[in-house]
Amino acid sequence: MFAEGKKMNAAKIREKVAFSVLGLVTLLVVIPILLIIFYIVKNSIGTISWEFITQSPRNGMKEGGIFPAIIGTIVLIVGTMLFSLPLGVLSAVYLVEYARDTFFTRLMKLSVVNLSGIPSIVYGLFGFTLFVLFLKLGTSILAGSLTLAIMSLPVIITATKEALESVPLSFREISLSLGATKWQTVRYCVLPYAIPGILTGTVLSLSRAAGETAPILFTVAAFYLPRLPRSVFDQVMALPYHLYVIATQVPNIPVSISFATCFVLIGLVFLMNLVSIILRSHFRKKKLW
Amino acid sequence: MVKETIIKTANLNCYFGALQVLKNLNLEIHRNEIFGIIGPANSGKTTFLRALNRLNYLNASYSQDGEIFFADKNLKNISDNILRKKIGIIFALPQVLPVSIYNNIAYGPKVHGIAKKDAIGHIVEESLKKASLWDEVKDRLDSPAMKLSGGQQQRLCIARTLAVEPDVILYDEHCSGLDPISTAKIEDAMQQLKETYTQILVTNNTKQAARVSERCAFFLMGELIELDETAALFTEPKDKRTDDYITGRFG
Amino acid sequence: MPRKISEYIIESLIRLSGFLVIAFVFLIFLFLLRDSLSLFKEYKIGEFLFGRNWLPISEPPKFGIVPLFLGSIYVTAGAIVLCVPVGIAAAMFIAEVAPTFLKNILKSLIEILAAIPSVVLGFIGIVWLSPYLKHTFGLSTGMCGLTGSLLLAFMALPTIISISEDALVGVPRAYKEAAFGLGATRWQALWRIVLPAASPGIIAGVMLGIGRVIGETMVVMMVTGNSPVIPTSLLQPLRTLTATIAGEMGETVSGSVHYFALFAVGLVLFIITFIINFIADSCLRRARK
């Protein structure tokens, strides 16, 4: 009996060791995340100021702020949303509410999966050849937004699909049994209750689009455009592209400006993520069923 | 008095995938009667009900052959949303939308094109009165419907069905989750509704069928075994299987 | 009836959206193919796929993608070797060992990591990781494959961790309880029963991670040195398929052979990630059943 007790102890010891190793490895993952954020914040503190955010660059980017890049990124976010949200929501509505189990439907689901796996630079190529060249939009906000929008589709479609599927089946049954048409059912008894999930997924997808560089490399981004865009056919500066260029291609720019740009970019992306998380928990509390 | 037929089925067969759920069903429902359907589980009672307003098609594996006629029109020639307006259904468990009592009932008229607030308000009040729920909720029409008790919610479901002015009301074991008092209130309401509506009642509770219906059908394993005036069916059933079921030897 | 017409229009739009999603995948493939075929009119496809020299500006230009392909493979392999064990270990810790409050903190941190834009990680690579590695290991340059692999491993972690964690949590409780009933410790149950049961989902997660890493552009462009030679070790500069497109597009003339060659590289990337994602998605679907 004591021998068995000893064997149990050995197993317990092995468990403690194993779990500690797992914990240490997790720490190995988590600590760098905090360190990176800390490192960026620490090195930007001197440069970040209200002027930095609100002024245009001067003197070949050696002085001044990055206001046009911030505006450019915001403009691209809005443009991306305008194209990807309706298309993404309607596609998901089709998949969940209208599609039957046919080859076409399976092809569509496969397409969504594929779109989500395409490298961002391939989107950049596609955007360049379709929007900039073929449709003759030139390197423009329009071309960049459309490219980012196609890239954002899979996330919005998936989030909308989950939101629609979480609406109870009984809502649809009630509506149909009262003689409403399919679209009336979707519009009054399904979509309104899916909006929280759709909103959360959209903000998340836009936060990713805001941080992307490769798709905008050839479709919209410009490096030094001190004036703000005047039409959708203009180029714009954008934060990720700006960071890339000053970090790799332009010599003699003080590294503090790079850090500060990095800080603003991360700040914007994290802010959007935070909004998405707040939305998610707010709606979870308000759930009526 | 000549009984006018409002619903008729001809050789109706219903399938879910390869499984046949209703076999060769032929029956007629008369206008303004309360028609009961009894039988053990899986006898096809609910399938029959839902075939009348084509709700079975919400299930992707459903198929049927044979004909159903509503007021002498073949069901195939009536569009889904018109059909379901004319043939309403009350489900087994009360299902309400997460909105106010008022909006639950106003939804039906709204989707059928009634826009004026006064008209809708009038419909809401009339429907709640016919469903014997008006007195209990008239002071709180804007409160959430989900806060009502089970019996009240079920009467709400009846009210919302009445609000779209159907010709036929289907009841799919609608009292199965309710206490006896709520059940009694609903059965009273059903008697009041007889003047204006045809009602078809599917129930597991043979005593309820005996109380409420005028004619009654016994379904077993997808087949119509016997159909007769309720009193006759319950006192002198012609088929042994009917007798066995009613007396509780199985089911 | 006006309502019938507007309903018809909306339902048509919904169906059209579904169709557009499929159309985009085909369009991307077609546009890539079109310009790639233009390459193969003037340059043999065999020399493209198997050529060992990528010298676009030499006379005559050479477009062999073997160095680029191997560059991608090396960097990806290096990243996978690091992030798969770490990621699975972290997933095991989060799913099975961590108490609830810690679990939520860790999951939030992983979400934060997932939100960091790739250009930011590339920037960190330039200003910190690269000099650090060069200094610590006495390398001739910090701009090498190893730097890229480390950063890419870090980037792929959220994908691997979250999918693996889902897979572990999805193992039916009955399996674990059966193990406990036989006297196993939590570690033994985890290692011998839960982990193998979750392996289809974990493998799918790893494949998706591989897909992400192969498709990553900005990080590799910023830290791996961009030297299109056949790599022999991770400690030298190399070049990936993605960085080639991003780096050289700006220097090509639209319609030149070099331009078409870059599209052909894009096509190769598209096909590789298509296959990886298809397999991963099939694994995930089978795992969910």
Image (cartoon, rainbow, N blue to C red):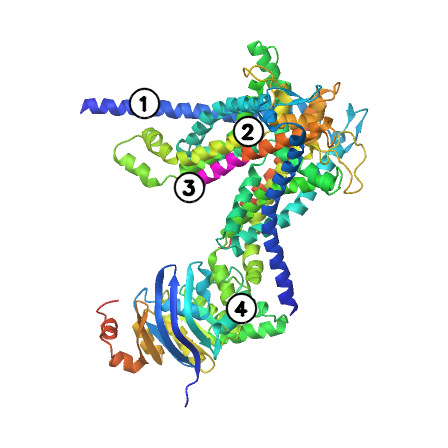
Name the residue carrying label 4. B81
Chain name for mark 1: A
Point out the stretch of residues depicted in magenta.
C274-285
Q: Is residue C209 left or right of residue B36?
A: right
Q: Are dots 3 and 2 in contact, CB under 8 Å?
A: no
Query: Marks 1/3: CA distance?
Result: 36 Å
- In the picture, residue B113 is in which quadrant? bottom right
Q: Are dots 2 and 4 in contact, CB under 8 Å?
A: no
Q: From the viewer's side, name the closer residue of B77 and A192.
A: B77
Name the residue carrying label 2. C213
Magenta stretch holds residue C277: yes
Query: Marks 2/4: CA distance?
Result: 51 Å
| Same subunit: marks 1 and 4 | no
Q: Reply above or below: B132 against A75.
A: below
Classify mark 4: residues with Cα within 10 Å, few (<14), some (14-19) or many (20+). many
Element type at mark 4: helix
Chain name for mark 4: B
Chain name for mark 2: C
Element type at mark 2: helix
What is the residue that sits farthest to the bottom in this orientation? B1
Residue C133, how many percent across, how many down?
Answer: 57, 14
Residue B82, how many percent across, how many down?
Answer: 53, 71
Query: Marks 2/1: CA distance?
Result: 37 Å
Element type at mark 1: helix
Magenta stretch holds residue C143: no
Name the residue carrying label 3. C286
| Same subunit: marks 3 and 2 | yes
Front tag of 1 and 3:
3
Name the residue carrying label 1. A13
Query: Marks 1/4: CA distance?
Result: 68 Å
The kind of secondary structure the magenta stretch mainly shows is helix
